Structure formats: C-alpha cells, structure tokens
Amino acid sequence: MLLPIPDVLTAEQVLRARKLFDEAEWVDGRVTAGYQSARAKDNMQLPEGSPVARDLGAMVLTALEQNALFISAALPACVFPPLFNRYQGGQSFGTHVDNAIRQVPGTPHRIRTDLSATLFFTGPDEYDGGELVVEDTYGTHNIKLPAGHLILYPATSLHHVRPVTRGARIASFFWIQSMIRDDSERTLLFDLDVAIQRLNSEIANHPCSVQLTGVYHNLIRKWAHV
C-alpha cells in the first residue's frame, strides 16, 4: 500500500522546522547508509544526535501519534527516530531498497523496517526534480507532496530520488515496524477500518458496525506480531 497522508504537520510546525534547518550544520548523508545505499546516495543530512534532529524528531513522533490516518494505515509497533535530509545542486539518491533491520542509535533495540515514510518540509514549487520514485506491482509512482504531508509505502519497494536541479528539497525520513508485518494483511485491515468509519459516520449505531468491528479486531489478533 502506497498512501499519502496530508497535514501531518501544521504550517506553523513546518515554519519552525525550516528556521532550525537554516541554522543547522549538515553532514554527508552517507553516514547512515548501508553498503548498497552508500554507493547510490548523494545528499546532506542532519547528524542523528544533534539537538535540532532530536527536537524535530520528537515533534514528528508526537504528530504521528495524533494522526488517525497514519495509525490506521501503519498499525505501528515502533517508529525509528526520524532523520532529516536535504538535496540540492543536482544531488540525488539512486535506486535502492531500505535495510530490513535498523539499529536504534544509542540503544540495544532493533526494528524491522516494514514501512518507509517521507515527510516533506519544502513544497513542490520550491525545487525542480527531487521526486521520490517508488516502484511496486502496480507500476512506478512519482511523489512530490506539499510541505507537512507524508508518503507511506512498503519498505520492500525499490525507490529513488531524482536529482534536484533548482532549489532545495528538505524532508524527514524514517521507518516503521508494524504490528502487522505483511503488507497485504495490513492493507485489508486499513480498508476495513476505513469502511467501518464511513458506516459509522453515515448511519450511526448500525448493528453491522459492531459486527464489522469485531471482525477487524479478530483479524488483528490473528495476524499481529507484538
């Protein structure tokens, strides 16, 4: 499932982040790349342990916790601390697949990367190029969202970022270990949840709503890895 999630951050939050980005020191993005990715990666990144990265990462995580669409689609067990990157002056990221397991810095914890996410801090009119291109069974998708919007997609997908030829593309990127590790099962649960919510909004207290909600939770019990 490839899903855009609008307005994860408010305009005020994006503006605050942009001011911090302008004052921050950026380093070579290959510091967090695996062997395969390092050969394809050309961008800049906030150091993981920097005060700005920690501050903005906490802001992103709080926003995700409050976003019902994200919770419904991802069914997160844990979220990797958000990272932040910048592309400009022709920088790009060649085709790659994200590492299956990520070590959470400074801890003994590892997460399985079921889902990848990119949260945009610059709008499409601020830069040329820079599309996130995701390949899946339905074809190739070119993604360039407004600031504050997020794209969620399976971490198993081949993807790349096209060269930025004007301006700068700034985004946060991170991974999610879902309680439901299989993408097809997660998609079925998401579709069912959306249908239940629509039924509740159009026909309040319909008897089928309770039955369908029971089916939803029983499927989670069947498929969940927690």
Image: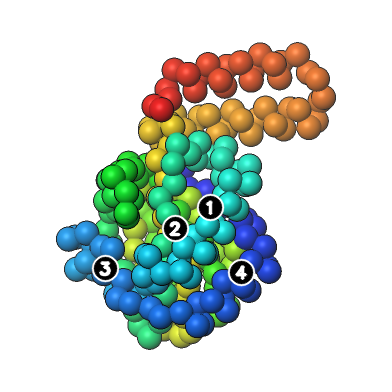
- In this rendered view, identify the residue nearer to me: 106 or 117: 106
**Residue at horizontal 42 percent and vertical 22 percent from the top:** 223
Dot 1: few (<14), some (14–19), or many (≥20) neighbours within 10 Å? some
Element class at badge 3: helix
Q: Which residue is mark 2?
A: 82
From this view, report whether residue 17 is shown above or below residue 2: below
Marks 2 and 3, the one that precedes in the sequence: 3
Q: Left or right: 134 with respect to 59?
A: left
The one nearer the camera, 100 or 191, is 100
Q: Earlier in the sequence, mark 2 or mark 1?
A: 1
Residue identified by numbered label 3: 31
Inspect this view and state whether residue 154 appears: no
Left or right for 98, reference 80: left
Q: What is the three-letter code of the residue carrying label 4?
A: Val
Q: Give whichever of discs 3 and 1 has the lower sequence position.
A: 3
Q: Secondary structure at mark 4?
A: helix
Indicate the position of residue 24 as horizontal and vertical percent values. Answer: 46, 79
Which mark sits nearer the N-terminus, 4 or 1? 4
Which residue, given by chain and number where applicable, does mark 1 sit on?
Answer: 61
Q: Earlier in the sequence, mark 3 or mark 4?
A: 4
Q: Are marks 2 and 3 in contact (CB under 8 Å)?
A: no
